[in-house]
Amino acid sequence: MPSCVSCHNNNINTKSKAISFHRFPSEDKIRLQRWLIAVRSNLREPWTLEKIQDSIASKNPAFVCSEHFSADSCIDNPKARYVPYSVPAKVLLQDAFPTQFGRSTSRVSSERQREKRDRKELLQKLLQQSNDACDHQMTEPMSSVDETGMTEASDAGAASPSAPQTKFDSGIVTSQGLLDSGVSTSSLLSDSGSSTAQSMLDSGVSTSSLLSDSGSSTAQAEVAQGYGLKFHTYCKPPSAEPDKFVTASTQTELTGEMIESLMSSTLCSTPKAKANMRELSFATLSPVASPSDKNDPTFNLSSFETDMDDTDTDYEYDSEEEEEGNGSQFYIVHRSKLLERFQTCECGQPLAVWNMKSTGSMLAIEYECSSCSNRGTWHSQPKIGSMAAGNLLIPAAILFTGGTYKKFADICDTLRLQKFSESHYNNVQRTYLLPAVNDYYLNEQQLILRRFQATAEEEAQQVTLLGDGRCDSPGHCAKYCSYTLMEEKTQFILDFQLAQVTETGTSQAMERHAFEKSLEFVRDNGIDVECIVTDRHRGIGASLKQRNNRHINHQYDVFHMAKSIQKKLSKSAKRKANRALGPWIKFIKNHLWYSSSTCEGDDVLLQEKWLSLIDHIANRHTFRKNQLFKKCAHHRLTPDEKENITWLRPGSAPHRAMREIVSNKTFVKDMAHLTGFKHTGVLEVYHNMLTKYTPKRLHFPYLSMRARLQLSVLDHNNNVFREQAKTLEGDPRWSVVYPKRTSLWVARKLFEAKTYEYRQQLMEEVVRRKESGQWKYGQHVLPDPEMPANIAPVERGSKQEAVDAYRTRFRPR
């Protein structure tokens, strides 16, 4: 892993920065000496000059990052514009050597850890001073102390009447306006410096105003008067000598103007500042509770025991929101904790638990008191109809989130969590879940179709559909094939059709069959189809050439065409004689995208641009025989630029192989379907998400497969209009990834989190179906498809015959 010898930069912590790493020049001894002299006083441990020289000798070179080179020591690489393979964006001049040192290159994580450590040390120090102060006695409240030079601040520091005050567990009084901003403050007197305190302010931590012992009494009075301090003793009776420190149980009154000033100047917006401050108090910032605080009647020990970095979110119970069934919260409770609730009766006598029974995920406890007549049965879950809520809602949650019973059972078995059986899951699925998903999907589908149908006021929109098929398993032995049609502009999925191999006889014919059914469904619902974009499936192409489909403009996906040409070129470049073709493959693929995007809908111009690369690769850039495209679109190359490019010699083996693939008659003929520059990349993304609901390594029955496809469509259509996520400062969020296929760092957008409101509506529909009592548990509500259930052409024999016919070449275990 390359890392800089002068700073902590490496190729991991600089992913989001444009930083490159340069090796020490091992060939030029004079230049190497200049580099060593430049970095010798700026080396970080464990690097030394001797270690650098040893690493160069062992061919394990050391590196210096680009942050230590001036801007004028780098130039653009002329190969970057013309050579179709990866080259560095900039190169160093021959006489360049590192000169930029002294800038801070410490890692952000180290700086944050250092700030966190400084804050903890300061808080420990403040608390220790507070504990020491409790051993002294105060003569009177600070507002009337004159011995230390403090002036009375009761009037100057009074809280604004419009700002209500809230008292925390630790005894601090602050304004409600500051409480809502996510920060609680108090004024503390300390002899510590101001730099650490300022770092606390910058970090958004609940901080205090620090008054120095070494400062003059006038300065102390000004600070006290400015913040309106009122000291209240919760410790010992006041003594003759005033205390120099303020304890953690100090009440501080802040005016509305002071709160607004603090919020606008020092308390910046941070992720921690957005936490719900109703759950926080100043006590959570103190690692150790002082004895004086424990004497305070408002003291809460649990707040001192809370970890500073791991503040849990408390659940606020609201009896009005508590409902039966899926409206309330579910918790995982240990068995021993449940039995603690059945140890003592209301009369004070021991309570006997004489029976515990589990029904799926629900526990029933039968108890009886030995002294009084108190007896009964307690259930861990409410019931929906005659079924426990968990036994109905957990199967629904498994299906609606794309899970499987097998994974759920593995989790429960590992955790020793009580669960229901797989047969119960299948019964609930066929009776309540699958019908609920089917009805909800059909209603949502009709709402989307109405957006494109003709109305009394306007005609139907002419739409462009993107289509692609997906088999349920890899290889050529799939059982199911789903074909999806998506509207291009809105990216809504209008319809999908699921085909089974028994309908067509072969898995290759399923895609055309599903496409024809989906296109027929869209037409029957009044959708005017103007264009359809698919891959080069010959069966679909033949279907669109039929008389009733000839008016539809059939376009091919550029991505699939480019992928096809790339596979053929890569296979040819593996031969020893054609290795020189390898660096040009990426350029040839990109040229297909360029030709399709700039052909202006003219198929002749598209073909001429595409075939021109045969001469371009051979360093010939004019084409007199062409009708429209006479010369290359790039600028005239200089002699130096031509020398930096590895051209293919006309008539050579790699040039002939490239010419044969590029000018293939079938491929050139199909390019007439690329004039619209259409691609189905959005459908590829959808198919990637589809593996969450229908993994290719698992088999599902037909109705279950269809329901999971419906759920995936609902997932997609409900999250179509997601925008790019933004930071707290309002900047768009990006991620930088390194795909192995391209071997380049690329930026990708980060989108907002998905929303799943439809899942709650599905859960409510499941509860409604159960409460209605219309269907019996385990009943097949949806009709089975009218097709052969078994893909085997021969009927199944008896199991015993198959066992008797079993033979093996291996030794039985």
Image (cartoon, rainbow, N blue to C red):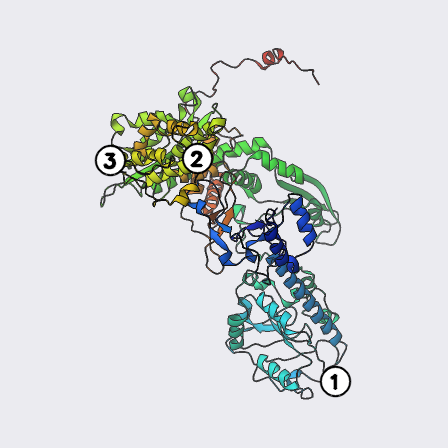
* Mark number displayed over residue 627: 3
Left or right side of 468 for 200? right
SS at circle 2? helix
Above or below 245: residue 452:
above
What's the residue at 53%, 66% (across, down)?
268
What's the residue at 72%, 73% (across, down)?
129
Between 411 and 487, the residue placed more toward the observer is: 487
* Mark number displayed over residue 241: 1
Residue 312 makes an appearance in the image: no
Q: Amino acid at mark 3?
A: Gln
- The residues tagged by marks 3 and 1 sit, at their Cα atoms, a distance apart of 103 Å
* Mark number displayed over residue 794: none
SS at circle 3? loop
- The residues tagged by marks 3 and 2 sit, at their Cα atoms, a distance apart of 27 Å
In x, y percent, where is residue 614? 36, 33
Residue 247 makes an appearance in the image: yes
Between 64 and 368, the residue placed more toward the observer is: 64
Above or below 732: residue 444:
above
- The disc, 3 or 2, on the residue closer to the chain's N-terminal end is 2
* Mark number displayed over residue 585: 2
SS at circle 1? loop
Quadrant in the picture for residue 307: bottom right
